Every structure is written in C-alpha cells, then in structure tokens.
Amino acid sequence: MHRTGTFKLVNERVRDNVINFIRALPVDDKSPLVISIQEMTRTLEQNARMWATLNDIAKQVDWHGIPLKSEDWKHIFTATMKGQRSVPNLDGTGFIILGQSTRTMTKKELSDLLELAYSFGAEHGVKWSEKAKADLVYFDWYKDQLAA
C-alpha cells in the first residue's frame, strides 16, 4: 500500500512530521516512491486577483486594434514574462503563443505576472474596477512581504 501526503513546510513541527512520514514509507527498488519538494504554487486569492485584472484590461484595451478576451491577455502576459515563442497554428492562418499555465506558477511567479499586468494597465490608461483596486492594494502589501 502506497501512502501519499502533502505538507506545507511552515514550522519545525511540520518538518518533524514530514521526516516521520518519510521514515514510515516502504522502500522498494522495484516500485520506488517519488518524493518531490517544490515551492508552493499560486494561491486562490492570487488567481482571483489575476482574473479581475485581466478582465479590466480586456474590457478597456484593444491590442493593435483587436479586442482580446481575458484568457488571451493571460497568454500574452505569461508569454511576455517567460520569453515564450509563437508557432504557426495547424492550418497556417495564424500563430499560437506557447505560454505557461498559471496553474503551475509559484506564488512569486504569479506575483511577477500581476506586476506586469498592473504596469501594462497603468501605461494604457486602464481604470481598475473596485475588485481590482482592492486587490491592487493587497498585491502591493504582498509584494513587500515577498521582498522581506
């Protein structure tokens, strides 16, 4: 029987629990378990902030005369941030941006994405909705916490 577990390493007690959990796992060279340690991915609050921001941009900015949806702006910002490439689509009539899923971004990466979107919005005269304005205040506080 394989056991699985997810731990948020936030204090010594949790670290001790992780160590004990690993010690209790079976060792099997024919069917080994994989242990992965990674930075925590984006939060639900960050995700909500991202969509509020993208919605405001989509409603107010036409890109080179083309109105874009929030999802389109997400692809543009992730591709810009990550230096992604574009390739012709399957029928050759357009291009596909090879961006990164925000679902797998770390909290820091999504914070950087939000900073890029807010900066872009400010440069293009976006009037932030009440939701995005409240999130922008929280975002500034959160960015300061990441820098500390």
Image (cartoon, rainbow, N blue to C red):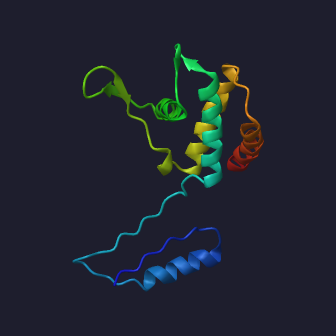
Give the quadrant of residue 91: top left
Left or right: 64 in relation to 29? right
Q: Tell me where residue 73 appears, x and y as whole percent.
A: 53, 30
For residue 34, side relative to residue 79 (left or right): left
- Up the image or down, 39 lies above or below 66; here it is below
The residue shown at (59%, 68%) is 9
Task: Please say if 82 is above or below 27.
Answer: above
Residue 122 in the image: state x and y as whole percent.
Answer: 70, 24
User: Horizontal placement of 51 versus 143: left or right?
Assistant: left
Q: Residue furthest top?
A: 65
Identify which residue is drawn at 64% across, 23% down. 60
Q: Is residue 122 above or below residue 140?
A: above
Q: Is residue 11 left or right of residue 100?
A: right
* Residue 97 in view of the camera: yes
Q: Quadrant of the N terminus?
A: bottom left
User: Total of numbered circles in the picture?
Assistant: 0
Give coordinates of residue 108: x percent, y percent.
59, 47
Residue shown at 47%/50% (left/top)?
104
**Residue 120 visible somewhere in the drawing:** no
- Residue at image x 56%, y 80%? 17
